[in-house]
Amino acid sequence: MPGRMINVSLSESGRLIDQKLIDNTMRRRILLTVKMPGLVLASLLCFNYDSLAQTTADASQIQTSNLDQQIRDFLQREVTAHVADIKALDPPPERVVGALATGEFSWGTFMRTLGAYSEFAGTKTIANHDVPHMIGKMAQIEWIRGGKTWAQLYAAMALESFGTDLKDNVLWLALSSEERATYIALLDPGRFYDAKTHTLIHLPENYFGVAARIAAIDYELGLNKDRASLDDLLNQAARQFTGGALFADDALPTGRYDRYSNEYARAVYDAAELAGRDDLLKAVAPSLKEQMKLWWDLLSPDGYGYSWGRSLGAISYMDTMEIAAFVGKHPEFRPAPLPQLASAYFAAWSWLRRDFNDETHLLSIFAFGRGDYSYITKDREWQQTTTFFGKVIAAHQMFVKALEKEGVKSFSRQLSLADVARFEYFRNGPGRKFGVWIVRQGNIHFELPFVTGPKAATSDYEPAPHGFPGFVVPVEKIYPCLVPFLELEDGRTIAPADGADEIRPAADGKSVTAFWKRWAVAGSKAGETVDPTLVSEVTWSLQGNSLHRVESLIASKPLKIRRLWLAIPSRNSHFETVELGNARIERLTSNGTTLDVQVKHADWPVQISAYATGDDSLGRGDRGAIPLHLILESKSISLTPGAPGSWEITLSTQ
């Protein structure tokens, strides 16, 4: 569905020069409305709620016992439905509850879910199926299919669920000698970790945490008695933290800092705790303290955590439940009192519960307008839902114990979060700088990260105000989301992104300035930069309900830019151009949210247009559709030494 184009030119003084066009535009007050299919709207509105949501709609407090019962009832019903749909495992079904079960980790994930639920519910039979027998068959499936990483960890956790003494472990006792040998081979971290070179095999750094947990469980169960190999792997897994880092780079040394940094630290801590490595617990503790503070500052009232990077919507809510459970067990790392953590836990659970479709028995991973990273393929739809089951079971067991231990019988249904305005460095040594600016002021909450994605200038990792009301980026696109892309005469497209050469946060946390001498080439290999003899200096500042982005481009020799453009993608579905005094404002509205965009000044003509995405991939966000993009574009810009060019864009919300 194409967008209606509205073009505006700004002169060097920032005044409108195409007055005829503008006068006509102002008389008509152009209105663009994007209508989503009725079926989509219905699916967003018609959720099935459990009794807790119905009985506490007007209550200020949630009873811990009621929440516990709701989650138990949900798990009993849904795990039973999934097990009942599996008629046989030889051969394994291609689909379960209608969703493909052929993707990576699919059967290993369900192994973990079944083992965790068996322990949680105190049963070894689900839907008249013998759980240990099913898990044993699934281990064979993962072995035959070459299951690695998460499939291996979840298989180890499934076995652990039935007891750490294999002489009494009903799953282990149910296996034949050949099946036991296969299970042991499946749990070998060497399938993706090279012990000789101490390196992961073509995987991000967070998989060290996966390998460490597998190895620790193997040793706990007595499947591996080589203590030296365990300690060696744990040392490698913890090396970023033992080296003094508080945050883990998931793609050393490129600066990929995202939600995996927190997950990685928790994984290493869990493995070290299981292996009795007090030295590593002490080394990782400072990281966990800082990471939990950051997570709490990033948290939104609906329980959403990291708003940039590979969050994938539902996964970030699952993170919140797991993190709350982790700090419930380890109070020394809590960023807030336990009752407030319970409110966050409830908020995240509530979002996930609304997102779950009772009729299909699946999370709405591939609903209209939902985007996912390329590794979340359609054949992993079932796996994503059973991951949800397993994570909720493990988190709930742990968190309820903490609530009971500390006598938290009720808590506020509303998550109360204090204002914050600060900058957190991820890396501030020589070379490229990385960090995030976090702001929560009243109804404004956003994070502006300086980090690197899987490819250069990836939308989810760009220095844009992720979470600012009305603003949202499409998932995993090489696309200029409030970060200009510059096409040079030699054909390269460069962007001021992927960390920065220098970052200067203001002392009061209300602004930050960054400099780029070395630029990312859009879509190229992560971490690679070029020097186009051009410096970008950008200052973001928050003033009331407005965020200002002022950029200066400073050339050290004559430079021609064929094209400069950026996009302002929005969740809002209505667009109009209005005039307030002498100012022209592009207004995007929807459901009571208003995002005003104004080009306050530009030293070059700027054309402004609107694009309606329809079912285009640029219209898919982490938690829903992105119906409109505002496009700002300039062509044939000439820069000379000693004559910087600048422009200013303001985002405002009401």
Image (cartoon, rainbow, N blue to C red):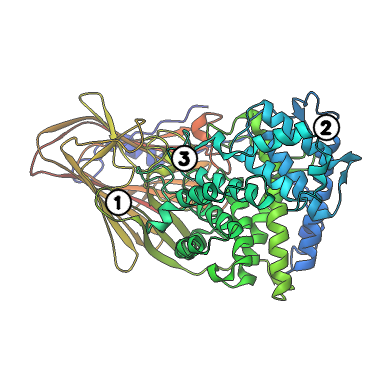
Question: What residue does disc 3 label?
Answer: 204
Residue 105 in percent (x, y) is at 64, 35
Residue at the spot x=79%, y=67% of the render?
65
N-term mark: 2 or 1: 2
Q: Are marks 2 and 3 in contact (CB under 8 Å)?
A: no
In the picture of the structure, the residue carrying the numbered disc 1 is 433
Give me the residue at 46% from left, 68% from top: 419
Q: Which residue is mark 2?
A: 86
Q: Please indicate, yes or no, whether residue 126 appears anywhere in the rendered image.
A: yes
Q: Disc 2 and disc 1: Cα gap in Å?
A: 51 Å
The kind of secondary structure element at disc 1 is: loop
Q: Nearer the viewer, mark 3 or mark 1?
A: 3
Q: Is residue 99 left or right of residue 602?
A: right
Q: Is residue 372 visible?
A: no
- In this view, 165 is above or below 613: below
> Mark 1 belongs to which amino acid?
Lys
Q: Is residue 178 or residue 652 the one in the foreground?
A: 178
Relative to 102, is 509 on the left or the right?
left
Front one among 71 and 83? 83
The mark that comes first in sequence, 2 or 3, is 2
